[in-house]
Image: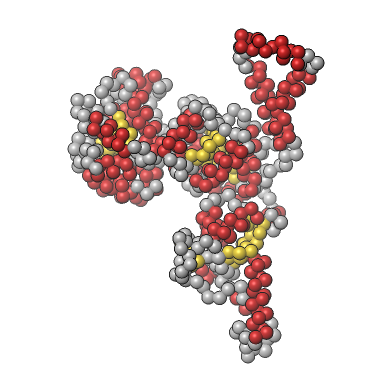
Amino acid sequence: MNKFTDLGLEESLVKAVSELGFEIPTPIQAETIPLLLDNNRDILGLAQTGTGKTAAFGLPSVQLTETDNRNTQTIILSPTRELCLQITKDLKDYSKYTKGVNILAVYGGSSIDTQIKGLRKGAHIVVGTPGRTKDLINRGVLKLGSISRVVLDEADEMLTMGFKDDLDAILSKTPDHKQTLMFSATMPSAMVRITKKYMNDPVEIKVSKVNLATKNVNHIQYMTSARNRFEALKRIIDVNPKIYSIVFCRTRRETTDVANKLTQAGYNADALNGDLSQSQRDDVMGRFRNRHLQILVATDVAARGIDVTDLTHVINYNLPDDAEIYTHRSGRTGRAGKSGISIAIIHSRETRKLRDIEKFSGITFSKEKIPTGDEICQAQLYTLVDKIDNIKVDDHQIEPFLPKIYEMLADLSREELIKHFVSAEFNRFLSYYKHAKDINIDESQSRSERKERSSNANFSRLFINLGKKDNLTPARLLGVINEALDSGNVEIGKIDILGNFSFFEIDKESASDLITNINDGFEFDGRVVSVELSEEKKQRSGRRDFKKKRSGDSGGYSGNRRSKPTSSERRKSYSGGKKKSGGGEGHRGRRKKNY
């Protein structure tokens, strides 16, 4: 099979698909569509984003709809509102020449009354998020008696986002005779449980792990220090004047921070994350699809459902923890036969994670240097000249103004005129990058260089009241720091973990926020955590020891001939007394986190 006409689809669907530019079905489509059209077997499809899953279940769902029956026959569940709307749009495109098929999207953040009216008018196919779908079922508005099939798209993501109970509630109320279709990129244990509970001997369809789009994608790595990550992003954007990109961040807070910095620097950028209302999300996506936004800064969850075929770049501001997620990200460029670029901005401690991605995905990152100021200025200048050369001139509109313009510029030669015009448009870049430093770092930096960097004036040394007795490790300490700051973009220097407490270095820009956030009732395994500058801790500890000696209270040294405490006893003086249980009053609203 190499054409949609070979899959058993009706001519009206083939025509619609052809108009959308699809001629050859993807592997998941070639295997799933005939199976859905020929029998009622449950199907478990393991395929990643960008492999054509929507058409795989959407085209048969449209064809199998009984238009003379007004009741809902297919329910399609998706994890996000964006993906819900995208699937609905795709299905409406597929059914363009199929008369009488009604498709309705139901999701939170939009008027439920409007969606209820749509259901009462008759919706053959309902595409919804789990929460809103369950709500409509509980209200008795979404009737399940005529359901022939239930589709779970991005099922693993729905479980990750905490929709397990909603899925259980929905599936348990659907008819036993229905056909269940589950599509997922991965197969976590919770997915296995759902397949055993709600699916009957499903046919498993599995396509290649590597996203099909990666063959058209060039993977590039740039290495810099964590504190220069934003500057690296800015230079990458500047050296690609025609960039149209999604920038992926770990957290909602980071998307907002990065988008705000880009906007303040004059770029057409905005953030997409779970903190936005539905109308705000629709506005951001509308501007991005219309290219009024050049850069969209998003989390992985918020980016689900974004279907833009002509992205030039995907930029990983932070690498994901899961190698498969990188494949999902990179697959958003290089689509529809076009080439694309996937960029990873990393620091020296992320090289192992990069190697894991290469091993998993079968790709190779090319190592490139972050562009210099001269390279950026050259790229921007040549793009400007090309734009001027190819601009369309409306002689009729500009003619009345030309005599005065000629008079004002009469003293300038041709060469001077070009210099003035280019400088007027270009001075911003020349000024900003005039003394731009090299922000690249080398993976082979020696340990001594890193130690020197970690102990310089850019770091603050902090005390924390956790140590080995609290089962604190460097990894768990980093987890505490990242959780308290809601970001992985923090530079950490030397870490010293002792018995009852520890010391660590952190970049000065983050130290104040960290102290404030942790001292606001942060807990570690049930214990209230405190952090402060180590110098302040030393001064107070010294005063306590001095008072003890003057009062004759040796604090455990009485009867001992030693005039000086041992090193272990000196360390105990920093412990600040007994451990707090975390059960006291005065810590209302504190965050609890177990590591």
Image color mode: secondary structure
Nearest the camera: 214 or 500?
500
Count how many numbered circles sit on residues in the image.
0
Q: Position of residue 459 (x, y in %)?
A: 67, 57
Q: Is residue 553 above or below residue 116?
A: below
Residue at coordinates 70% horizontally, 32% vertically from top-left? 428
Residue at coordinates 72% horizontally, 22% vertically from top-left? 421
Q: Quadrant of residue 257?
A: top right
Q: Quadrant of residue 508?
A: bottom right
Residue at coordinates 78% horizontally, 14% vertically from top-left? 410
Left or right of 11, for residue 472: right
Residue 203 appears in the picture as rendered: no
| Quadrant holding the N terminus | top left
Left or right of 464, for residue 168: left
Left or right of 580, for residue 491: right
Q: Position of residue 442 (x, y in %)?
A: 67, 46
Residue at coordinates 62% horizontally, 43% vertically from top-left? 230
Residue 307 appears in the picture as rendered: yes
Q: Position of residue 228 (x, y in %)?
A: 65, 45
